[in-house]
Image (cartoon, helix red, strand yellow):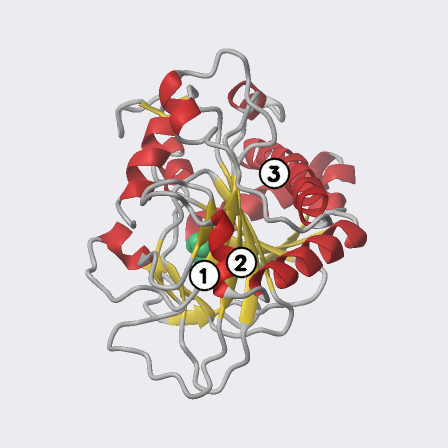
């Protein structure tokens, strides 16, 4: 791959006729091949992005004792601080590896619908545990809201790429149960990783769509390309990296692929941060193959996610 595939969302949205169809076909092509692309023309305001970076950095710069004030209270609690040694993503693929060399802060939906089922209340709608830092919560919530909007725009482009009406996915996105995760991978200088230990072990994402913001200029994110080799994803300033997850592969009856990816340990690297927004359809959305086939039985979005998540803890 000479150049990593990219897609300009604003250019797509203003395109008409054959040009629009060609751009939609390009999304389809990329999603059939790897499902990973650089997203340009996203329109998320730079100050919203700057503020959440600043907030995340200030959070991770605290002492472990301060971070522990918002620690996930029990294994499997989806939000709050997951400290070092808390997660091994490769376990979701049945690989028994040492824990990932990272820590994270995680938060859930900004509001809960009145009719949320009890299992959803206990999992996705668990409270986000806010650090005692006045600028953190508003910055986090503004970024979450901006990415929820962006995810809907991307899903609409996806619908066109799949020859569906642009608003096809709206019915499944009334109260998405998306999660936002800030990641901090400590510097690798002087660190000896155990065998098979990575910053993030090889995994596929679980949901419909991930919108990733790797720290500009950072190294180590790789995808397993269908040609059989690991390919590094560039971390350019001002763009997002998006990828589809297992639920979207299932939804498209494997027309689109959910590609294995990891963050490798490169010696003598500074700390690396990233923000991962895991977009997830409504808890009760029933995901049935879009081609009308019986490639997979229907699943409900929320319980599907919960099953995947608990396997890595
Ligand atoms: O930090 C990154 O760049 C990728 C993280 C990732 O793939 C994940 O958390 O699912
Ligand atoms: Fe991932």
Circles 2 and 3: CB atoms closer than 8 Å: no
Label 3, secondary structure: give it.
helix
181 above or below 295? Answer: below
| C-alpha span from label 3 to label 1 | 25 Å
The front one of 152 and 7 is 152
For residue 66, the mark is: 2
Judged left or right of residue 251, residue 140 is right
| Residue under the image location 41 percent in, 43 percent down | 256
| Residue under the image location 73 percent in, 34 percent down | 17
129 above or below 229? Answer: above
Instruction: Please tell me how crowded label 1 is: few (under 14), some (14-19), or many (20+) other residues with Cα within 10 Å.
Output: many
The front one of 19 and 194 is 194
**To which quarter of the image does residue 234 belong?**
bottom right
Judged left or right of residue 45, residue 4 is left
Residue 4 appears in the picture as rendered = no
Residue placed under numbered mark 1 in the picture: 103
Image location (x, y in percent) of residue 166: 62, 26
Q: Nearer the viewer, mark 2 or mark 3?
A: 2
Mark 2 or mark 3: name the one nearer the start of the chain: 2
Circles 3 and 1: CB atoms closer than 8 Å: no
């Amino acid at each position: 791959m000479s150049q990593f595939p990219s897609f300009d969302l604003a250019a797509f949205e203003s395109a008409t006729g054959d040009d629009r169809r060609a751009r939609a076909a390009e999304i389809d092509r990329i999603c059939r091949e790897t499902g990973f692309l650089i997203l340009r023309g996203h329109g998320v305001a730079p100050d919203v992005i700057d503020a959440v970076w600043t907030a995340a950095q200030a959070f991770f710069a605290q002492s472990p004792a301060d971070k522990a004030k918002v620690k996930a209270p029990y294994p499997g609690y989806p939000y709050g601080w997951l400290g070092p040694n808390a997660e091994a993503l490769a376990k979701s693929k049945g690989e028994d590896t040492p824990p990932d060399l990272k820590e994270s802060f995680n938060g859930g939906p900004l509001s809960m619908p009145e009719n949320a089922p009890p299992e959803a209340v206990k999992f996705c709608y668990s409270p986000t545990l806010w650090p005692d830092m006045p600028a953190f919560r508003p910055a986090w919530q503004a970024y979450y809201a901006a990415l929820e909007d962006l995810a809907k725009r991307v899903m609409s482009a996806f619908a066109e790429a799949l020859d569906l009406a642009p608003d096809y996915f709206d019915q499944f996105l009334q109260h998405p149960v998306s999660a936002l995760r800030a990641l901090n991978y400590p510097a690798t200088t002087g660190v000896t990783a155990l065998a098979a230990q990575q910053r993030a072990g090889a995994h596929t994402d679980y949901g419909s769509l991930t919108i990733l913001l790797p720290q500009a200029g950072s190294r180590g994110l790789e995808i397993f390309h269908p040609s059989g080799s690991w390919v590094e994803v560039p971390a350019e300033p001002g763009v997002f990296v998006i990828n589809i997850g297992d639920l979207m592969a299932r939804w498209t009856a494997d027309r689109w692929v959910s590609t294995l990816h990891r963050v490798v340990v490169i010696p003598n690297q500074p700390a690396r941060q990233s923000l991962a927004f895991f977009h997830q359809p409504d808890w009760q959305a029933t995901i049935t193959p879009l081609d009308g086939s019986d490639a997979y039985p229907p699943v409900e979005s929320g319980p599907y996610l919960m099953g995947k998540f608990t396997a890595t803890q």
